């Protein structure tokens, strides 16, 4: 089954063409890296793959859903159920504990508050932070904060995990920590796509997709 | 393939979500709510103060009764003062339903502390001849000393109204005052009489004394009568004809309690100026909330994008910010109601009035607040819903 399927996708912002006629397929259970220099269009690619933005032309399928046919509500439901996002800047609320930050990610899932907190605790346990539930973000290291963010992304058990420069703000030890977490999640069946410009991170993925000037240039499997 | 349907936010979650934006920046929330609090507090206080004053007068009215009528001769066609017959009060007493009647006659002279004070200084005190039934008719009380009696009404003895005594600087009887061209002895001072302010401002002597010492003609200028409650209307109709059979249209019949009632209505009417100020404060408060919310939306574009990535729909983002604006203005409104109630209480205490706040005042205040919160929240909420989800990914 294809988790992600882009056919002839182009995206333009005014006169600037960020993506040109991109074809890309990610099968369920894959761990892929999308590599390219800044400005290559890899972030645009992730936004469109994550349904945060719509393509100017071409079709995008996520988990079998053709997104151009979906309303805002349906797209939101799709994101809530199928996609987990990890961002370079963590995006954790400074006033909330790790547990509440993770539980916040489940707010739009329809679960009760108790269920959300239970699931959040389980997800934090899964990323090795079961003993840091009550810590605020400022009490955590960069690697720990990113692991909280990963826990938040996976708490609703989405089949697809999209990460945008997840190690961009981390030192090498923390990077390795987070990458091994992605590998572990992938081994449980989660499809993972990581955007990066770090060759070391890219090299750690079984499949690498190179993007340049808005086009997919090369694949190495 | 299953259909995709976004989950609904539970009311509690929505409330918590709306509150989270405020608790993250409590100082800003308080400052933004102050405008609304001041506006609501002003309006509640205006209503409360007016209701308290009105309640005071209504209670007074209840106590005094509304069955007192006053007759004055009025002006004749030729501009001359019409004269009441000497026995006006006695005639009035014969009308069916009349319980008591009394009369007074203005002597046109002044009362002074002593003979060295110029007669042109009247202190606004009228010297009036009175019959003995006046006090009963007005249901007045003697504060100190005694009322006139069959003996003292012939003597140079005077009973002072409460205000008259105050203006003369007298608190107890036994002293002498200068009336006309001789000394009169003060034998009593009356209590306040809210229904007969002119008696409060009078020095009262007996009719025989007035005729004997002041050359008064013995004709009354005002007749007071009290009837049973159910006869007030019929007595009213007969009074003019009774006291001035020749020219009934000239006699002027008034009901002193009507003046008090009018006073109550005026006291109950909210002063437009204060209400206007409250409305302006409310408007400014609403703008303050809207402004705060617009800034919050700008600052929290990242949070909005993040929530969209969690699966929040545009509608849910919109609702979140609307709820936040509502909570903000309700916070201000609640504080305003408390402040207003407190101010009403303090105002009533300071003026020794019964503190009254009609229940519709806080209810209306909170309803207004909700309306303002909604109006102030709509624009920021619409802006929040338009924030594209992609901002969560941008690294700026």
Image (cartoon, rainbow, N blue to C red):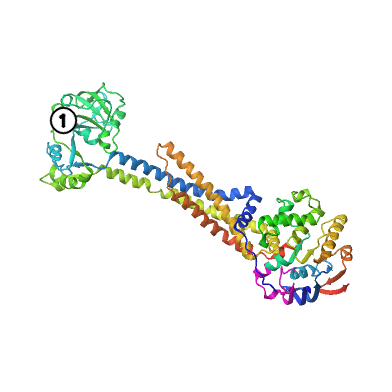
B396 falls in the magenta region: no
Q: Quadrant of the N terminus of chain B?
A: bottom right
Q: Quadrant of the C terminus of chain B?
A: bottom right
Viewed as shown, does residue B87 lie left or right of B20? left
Residue annotated with mark 1: B207
Q: Between residues A127 and B120, which one lies in front from this camera angle?
A: A127
Q: Between residues A123 and B73, which one lies in front from this camera angle?
A: A123
Q: Between residues B26 and A102, which one lies in front from this camera angle?
A: A102
Residue B347 in view of the camera: yes
Which SS class for mark 1? helix
Residues in magenta, as a range = A50-76
Q: Between residues B122 and A175, which one lies in front from this camera angle?
A: A175
At horizontal 80% and vertical 71% (from top left) the residue drawn is A28
- Residue B359 placement (x, y as % from top left): 44, 48
A2 w.r.t. B317: above or below: below
Q: Chain of mark 1?
A: B
At horizontal 66% and vertical 62% (from top left) the residue drawn is A110
Residue density around tag 1, few if under 14, some if 14–19, many if 20 or more, within 10 Å: many
Kindly indicate the quadrant of the structure image that contains residue A36: bottom right
- Residue A209 placement (x, y as % from top left): 85, 71
A51 falls in the magenta region: yes
Residue extending furthest toward the left = B246
- Residue A97 placement (x, y as % from top left): 72, 51
Residue extending furthest toward the top = B174
Residue B396 in view of the camera: no
Viewed as shown, does residue B233 lie left or right of A178? left
Viewed as shown, does residue A40 lie left or right of B121? right
- Residue B24 placement (x, y as % from top left): 66, 51
Disc count in the image?
1
């Amino acid at each position: 089954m294809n988790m992600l399927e882009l056919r002839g996708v182009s995206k333009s912002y005014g006169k600037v063409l960020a993506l040109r006629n991109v074809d890309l397929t990610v099968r369920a259970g894959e761990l892929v890296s999308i590599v390219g220099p800044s400005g290559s269009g890899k972030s645009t690619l992730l936004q469109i793959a994550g349904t945060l933005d719509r393509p100017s032309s071409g079709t995008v399928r996520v988990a079998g859903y053709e997104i151009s046919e979906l309303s805002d509500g349906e797209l939101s439901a799709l994101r809530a159920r199928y996609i987990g996002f990890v961002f370079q800047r963590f995006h954790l609320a400074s006033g909330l504990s790790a547990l509440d930050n993770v539980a916040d990610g489940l707010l739009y899932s329809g679960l009760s508050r108790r269920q959300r907190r239970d699931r959040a605790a389980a997800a934090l346990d899964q990323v090795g932070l079961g003993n840091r539930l009550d810590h605020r973000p400022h009490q955590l290291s960069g690697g720990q904060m990113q692991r909280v963010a990963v826990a938040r992304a996976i708490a609703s058990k989405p089949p697809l995990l999209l990460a945008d420069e997840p190690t961009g703000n981390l030192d090498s030890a923390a990077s390795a920590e987070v990458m091994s977490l992605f590998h572990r999640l992938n081994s449980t069946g989660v499809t993972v796509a990581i955007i990066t410009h770090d060759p070391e991170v890219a090299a750690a993925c079984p499949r690498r997709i190179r993007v340049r000037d808005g086009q997919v240039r090369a694949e190495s499997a | 393939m299953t259909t995709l349907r976004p989950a609904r936010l539970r009311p509690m979650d929505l409330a918590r979500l709306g509150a989270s934006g405020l608790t993250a920046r409590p100082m800003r929330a308080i400052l933004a709510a102050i405008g609304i609090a001041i506006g609501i507090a002003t309006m509640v206080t205006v209503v409360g103060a007016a209701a308290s004053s009105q309640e005071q007068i209504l209670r007074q009215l209840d106590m005094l009764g509304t069955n007192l009528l006053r007759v004055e001769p009025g002006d004749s066609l030729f501009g001359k003062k019409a004269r009441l017959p000497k026995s006006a009060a006695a005639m009035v007493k014969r009308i069916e339903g009349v319980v008591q009647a009394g009369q007074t006659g203005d002597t046109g002279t002044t009362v002074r502390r002593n003979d060295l004070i110029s007669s042109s200084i009247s202190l606004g005190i009228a010297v009036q001849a009175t019959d003995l039934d006046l006090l009963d008719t007005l249901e007045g009380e003697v504060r100190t000393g005694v009322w006139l009696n069959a003996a003292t009404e012939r003597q140079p003895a005077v009973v002072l109204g409460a205000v008259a005594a105050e203006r003369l600087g007298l608190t107890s009887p036994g002293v002498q005052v200068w009336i006309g061209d001789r000394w009169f002895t003060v034998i009593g001072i009356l209590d306040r009489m809210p229904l007969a302010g002119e008696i409060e401002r009078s020095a009262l002597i007996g009719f025989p004394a007035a005729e004997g010492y002041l050359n008064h003609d013995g004709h009354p200028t005002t007749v007071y009568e009290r009837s049973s409650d159910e006869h007030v209307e019929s007595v009213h109709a007969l009074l003019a004809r009774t006291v001035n059979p020749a020219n009934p249209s000239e006699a002027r019949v008034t009901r002193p309690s009507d003046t008090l009632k009018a006073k109550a209505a005026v006291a109950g009417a909210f002063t437009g100026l204060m209400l206007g100020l409250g409305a302006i404060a409310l408007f400014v408060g609403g703008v303050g909330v809207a402004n705060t919310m617009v800034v919050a939306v700008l600052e929290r574009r990242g949070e909005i994008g993040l929530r969209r990535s969690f699966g929040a729909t545009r509608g849910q983002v919109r609702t979140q910010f609307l709820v936040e604006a509502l909570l903000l203005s309700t916070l201000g409104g609640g504080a305003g109601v408390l402040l207003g109630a407190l101010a009403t209480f303090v105002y009533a205490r300071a003026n020794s009035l019964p503190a009254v706040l009609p229940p519709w005042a806080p209810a209306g205040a909170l309803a207004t607040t909700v309306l303002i919160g909604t109006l102030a929240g709509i624009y920021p909420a619409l802006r929040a819903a338009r924030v594209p989800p992609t901002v969560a990914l941008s690294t700026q």
